[in-house]
Amino acid sequence: QQQVKQSPQSLIVQKGGIPIINCAYENTAFDYFPWYQQFPGKGPALLIAIRPDVSEKKEGRFTISFNKSAKQFSLHIMDSQPGDSATYFCAASFGNQFYFGTGTSLTVIP
Amino acid sequence: DGGITQSPKYLFRKEGQNVTLSCEQNLNHDAMYWYRQDPGQGLRLIYYSQIVNDFQKGDIAEGYSVSREKKESFPLTVTSAQKNPTAFYLCASSAGPTGVDTQYFGPGTRLTVL
């Protein structure tokens, strides 16, 4: 059973657009929600993370929106650039247990 | 320069061979993990270890083995019992229950069965 459901599987936007990637979870024990960015042939790198006591967190062009009642969270990339083209994974964790979404392949067209 | 190192970057295995992937971290993290990533798929947990000399099976442990004799090291052996081992293998670590729960990843090892 997939603990974290991620959508869409792939996404294509024009440069300057705002791609949005969504994730949903069921286990209310999760208390940490990170997003990772992965380029081909590389390991995932932590991008931004949020805890359930806040509804939004912004770091540079990346924003996480968190809806605790709906058990959903999303990543927004403002003013997207071709260099943002990568695979993005959401995750949820409690303790040392980490659960990942299936990933979203983002392509930003110049 | 702190981080996680994995070696080798590329590994080729003949059928019937066991191979060992190396993972070392100098972040002083208690917990370490091994994931398998197949094209277009997410990360699947193979094994994890929360403390030296202790480890637990993840979702796809069959055909794999690990050891955790030192805090810094968590090698993964892909045995001949693993029927489809060609994949990208990622090692990760986190501080553990007493620290920040962010998980950090190494650069990965791509294993190909010839």
Image (cartoon, coloured by chain):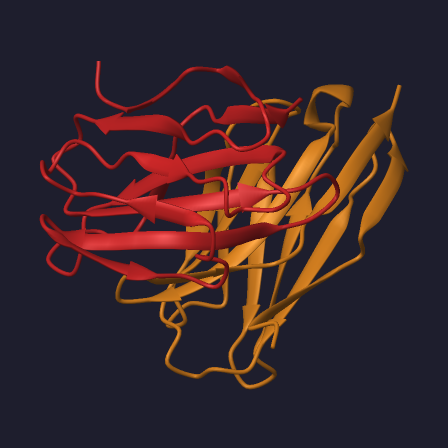
Chain colours: A orange, B red
Report if residue A44 is visible in the image.
no
- The answer to which image quadrant residue A71 occupies is bottom right
A4 w.r.t. A12: above or below: below
Which residue is at 83% across, 37% downward?
A17
Which residue of the protein is positioned furthest toward the front in this rendering?
B16
x, y percent for residue B83: 61, 46
Residue A78 drawn above or below residue A53: above
Decide which of B7, B43 is in the foreground and name it: B7
Residue B100, percent from left and from top: 22, 51
From the viewer's perspective, is residue B35 above or below residue B15? below
Image quadrant in which the N terminus of chain B is located: top left
Whether residue A23 is visible, yes or no, is yes
In what quadrant of the picture does the C terminus of chain B appear?
top right
Residue depicted at 55% across the width and 86% down the height: A69
User: Is residue A30 found left or right of B66 in the rendered image?
Assistant: right
Q: Position of residue B34 (x, y in %)?
A: 39, 44
Rendering quarter of residue B85 = top right
Q: Is A50 situated above or below B40? A: below
**Is B39 on the left-hand or right-hand side of B83?**
right
Q: Is residue B60 or residue A17 the one in the foreground?
A: B60
Tally of numbered discs: 0
Left or right of B29, for residue B11: right
The residue positioned 43% from the left and 84% from the top of the image is A28
Q: Nearer the viewer, residue B100 or B74?
A: B74
**Residue B19: x %, y % from top left:** 42, 28
